Image: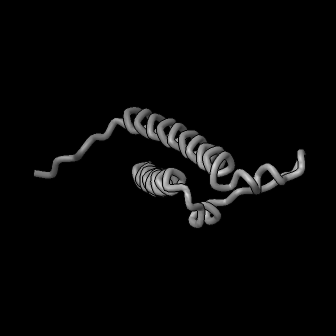
Amino acid sequence: MNKSKVIDLNIKKDYNRKLDKIVEKLEDIDKVIFGSMIELSTSDKWKDWSEKQKEGTVFEFNETMFENCPDINVAKLLDLRRKLDSTILELTQANKELS
């Protein structure tokens, strides 16, 4: 006997929308973590450097810079951010596969 499987596409669309919203929230958290890394590093270990910057100076921080930051808390946040980024990638790929 050949049984067919019925899938309600509306349920799947709702699921995918919810997953997209979750990924957006995680991306916002990622930005908060990165901002926290900048705040901590420039208020302690990199304070002298930060204070020597002229007002209005634009500086672009990147993740690689924090690999050498001697602040253990910044290192922990960097680790958390990398785990979060990995999870975001996995969820994004899973959502593409489910679509």
Please name the residue shown 47% across and 38% down the image: 22
Q: What percent of the width, then of the height, locates residue 30?
A: 55, 46
Please name the residue shown 31% across and 40% down the image: 7
Q: What percent of the width, then of the height, locates residue 34?
A: 60, 48
Q: Quadrant of residue 31?
A: top right
Please name the residue shown 43% across and 50% down the image: 91
Q: Residue at the left extreme?
A: 1
Q: What percent of the width, then of the height, locates residue 79?
A: 47, 57
- 61 vs 92, nearest the viewer: 61
Q: Is residue 42 left or right of residue 27?
A: right
| Residue 22 visible at all | yes
| Residue 92 visible at all | no
Q: Is residue 9 left or right of residue 92?
A: left
Q: What percent of the width, then of the height, locates residue 62?
A: 67, 60
Q: Is residue 51 left or right of residue 70?
A: right
In the image, is residue 23 above or below residue 89? above
- 21 vs 31, nearest the viewer: 31
Q: Is residue 59 left or right of residue 13?
A: right
Please tell me how many numbered marks the rendered image carries: 0
Please name the residue shown 76% across and 56% down the image: 49
